[in-house]
Amino acid sequence: MRWNPEPTFSDLMNSFLENDWNTLAPRRNCCTPAANIVEKEDGFHLELSAPGMNKEDIKMEVENNVLTISAEKEEEKTEGNKNFSRREFVYDSFSRSFVLPKSIDADAIKADYKNGILTVELPKKEEEKTKVKREITIG
């Protein structure tokens, strides 16, 4: 059997039915947003990519040393002309969880959302800041 680079009528119809008609139904796009985490002397700095969201769409909570960041956004688009009207509902959501080190002061976590990036500051507890890192000589 040879691979045929030319699509058949059946291939074109399947592509049309699978791609174009499915856009008429409600969609749910789930993804895991990318994250950058940097450890600093006084805590951790987390950046989460969440473009297209509003800050009101994002929810953050800490439970049992797990930080969960989630978001849901639902919007409706309507297109129309003389002969037809088309309506699409778009529903985007994500949820991402991070296990926090015991050194994090969960009551002092702060977050900000600008230009599609959620920035989260995770400060260390005061007693953790005072612990001095030292090098141990191997004898």
Image (cartoon, rainbow, N blue to C red):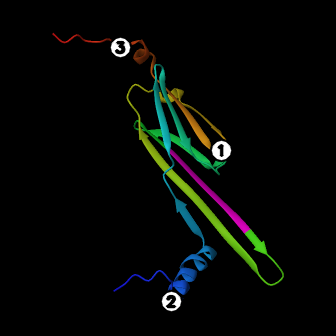
Q: Say few, some or many: other residues with alpha carbon within 10 Å of mark 3 (under 14 / 14 to 19 / 20 or more).
A: few
Identified by mark 1, the residue type is: Lys
Q: Where is residue 29 in the image (x, y as percent from the top left)?
A: 54, 62
Q: Where is residue 60 in the image (x, y as percent from the top left)?
A: 54, 42
Residue designated by label 1: 55
The secondary structure type at the circle numbered 3 is: loop
Residue furthest bottom as drawn = 9
Q: Give the range drawn in magenta.
A: 69-77
The majority secondary structure of the magenta stretch comes to strand
74 falls in the magenta region: yes
Residue designated by label 3: 133
Quadrant holding the N terminus: bottom left
How many tags in the picture? 3
Q: Which residue is drawn at 50% across and 83% down?
A: 6
Left or right of 75? Residue 109 is left
Residue designated by label 2: 10
Q: Say few, some or many: other residues with alpha carbon within 10 Å of mark 1 (under 14 / 14 to 19 / 20 or more).
A: some
Left or right of 120? Residue 135 is left
- Disc 1 or 2, which lies upstream in sequence? 2
